[in-house]
Image (cartoon, helix red, strand yellow):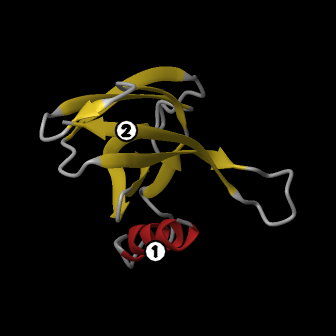
Amino acid sequence: MKKTLIFLLLISVLSCSVSDDTPRSYTEFLPIESVSMPDEFIKNQTYTIYLTYNKPTSCHLFKDIYYVVNANQSTVAIVSDVYPASSDCQETITEEETSFNFRPTELGSYVFKFWQGINTESATNEDVYLTIEVPVTE
């Protein structure tokens, strides 16, 4: 996850004009505050999973949902574009909601890891996740 964030930040910086040393925007992950999803899935049915997150400033704009699947485990985070050079940037916390659809195709269970930020109190600045395991039935 940290490597992906560094890669996204590097791309943002390199995409700026060569005549201006100030980045116009960069990409940042925003922590997921809460998740609304079923306690159980039925195989091959589509479900909407709702994510709530906070925009820390008016310079943060929703870009996408980071969604990576590894076998039956999915890692999910909110991707935001940040425009720090905006003259009307206000530091306000605005609660936002977004969603994505999920369709389980296998029986068993699916594990979702929702990124909730970085534990800055640990020596290694570890990522913190809300982990939810959901069983799948017929």
At 57% across and 23% down in the image, what residue appears?
93
Q: Residues within 10 Å of mark 2 (few under 14, many from 20)?
A: some
Which sits in the foreground, 4 or 133?
Answer: 133
How far apart are the two marked residues, 2 and 1, measured between alpha carbons?
34 Å
Placement of the C terminus among the 4 image quadrants:
top left
In this figure, which residue is indicated by the disc labeled 2? 135
Q: Is residue 134 above or below residue 28?
A: above
Which sits in the foreground, 9 or 74?
Answer: 74
Which sits in the foreground, 61 or 113?
Answer: 113
The three-letter code of the residue at mark 2 reads Pro
134 displayed left or right of 132:
left
Task: Tell me residue 107's x, y (percent).
Answer: 26, 48
Q: Are marks 2 and 1 in contact (CB under 8 Å)?
A: no
Task: Tell me residue 118's x, y (percent).
Answer: 69, 51
The three-letter code of the residue at mark 1 reads Phe
Which sits in the foreground, 119 or 102?
Answer: 102
Task: Tell me residue 47's x, y (percent).
Answer: 21, 30
In this figure, which residue is indicated by the disc labeled 1? 7
The numbered disc on residue 21 is none
Tell me the SS state at disc 1. helix
Tell me the SS state at disc 2. strand
Q: In this orientation, does residue 62 appear?
A: yes
> Tag 1 or tag 2, which sits nearer the N-term?
1
